[in-house]
């Protein structure tokens, strides 16, 4: 993938999580706690960080929020 499409993909992912968090009337802090992490790591994960731990956090958060990634 090109740099531009990766950036667009990461932005779409973050937006999807933010909308789901608002629809569930919760906060990133609460979802991060449910995923067993802190806000900083959670924010990095939903922003598209490619690390293994971030991928795990995204999977857990998506399951909690009921969204597909």
Image (cartoon, rainbow, N blue to C red):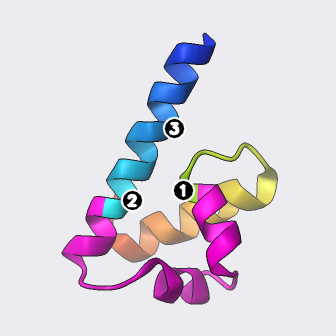
Q: Which of marks 2 and 3 is nearer the N terminus?
A: 3
User: Looking at the picture, how far across and down is residue 29, in whole percent?
Assistant: 52, 85
For the record, the magenta segment spans 19-45
Tag 2's secondary structure? helix
Residue 19 horizontal/vertical position (percent): 27, 61
Residue at the image position 44 percent from the left and 45 percent from the top: 13
Left or right, 26 with respect to 59, comes to left
Residue at (79%, 49%) from the top-left corner?
Answer: 51
Q: Which mark, by number, is residue 17?
A: 2
Picture quadrant where residue 18 is located: bottom left
Q: Judge the density around disc 1: few (<14), some (14-19), many (≥20) Cα neighbours within 10 Å.
A: many
Assign the magenta stretch its main secondary structure: helix
Q: Residue furthest top?
A: 2
Q: Mark 1 points at which residue?
A: 46
Closer to the N terminus: mark 3 or mark 1? 3
Residue tagged by mark 3? 10
Neighbourhood count class around disc 2 (C-alpha, 10 Å): few under 14, some 14–19, many 20 upward: many
Where's residue 26, x and y in %? 33, 85
Q: Do the residues labelled 2 and 1 touch (CB within 8 Å)?
A: yes
Q: Which residue is drawn at 40% across and 82% down?
A: 27
Quick one: label 3, few (<14), some, or many (20+) residues within 10 Å?
some
Assess whether mark 1 and mark 3 are in contact (beta carbons under 8 angstroms). no
Q: What residue is drawn where x is 63% and y is 57%?
A: 45
Secondary element at tag 1: helix
Compare marks 2 and 1 and give the one earlier in the sequence: 2
Total number of numbered discs in the rendering: 3
**Alpha-carbon span between mark 2 and mark 1:** 7 Å
Kindly state the secondary structure of the residue where label 3 is placed. helix
Tell me, yes or no, whether the highlighted magenta stretch contains residue 21.
yes
């Amino acid at each position: 993938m090109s740099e531009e499409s990766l950036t667009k993909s990461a932005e779409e992912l973050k937006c999807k999580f933010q909308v789901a968090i608002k629809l569930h009337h919760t906060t990133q802090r609460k979802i991060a706690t449910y995923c067993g992490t802190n806000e900083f790591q959670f924010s990095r994960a939903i922003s598209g960080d490619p690390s293994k731990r971030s991928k795990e956090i995204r999977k857990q958060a998506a399951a909690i929020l009921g969204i597909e990634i």
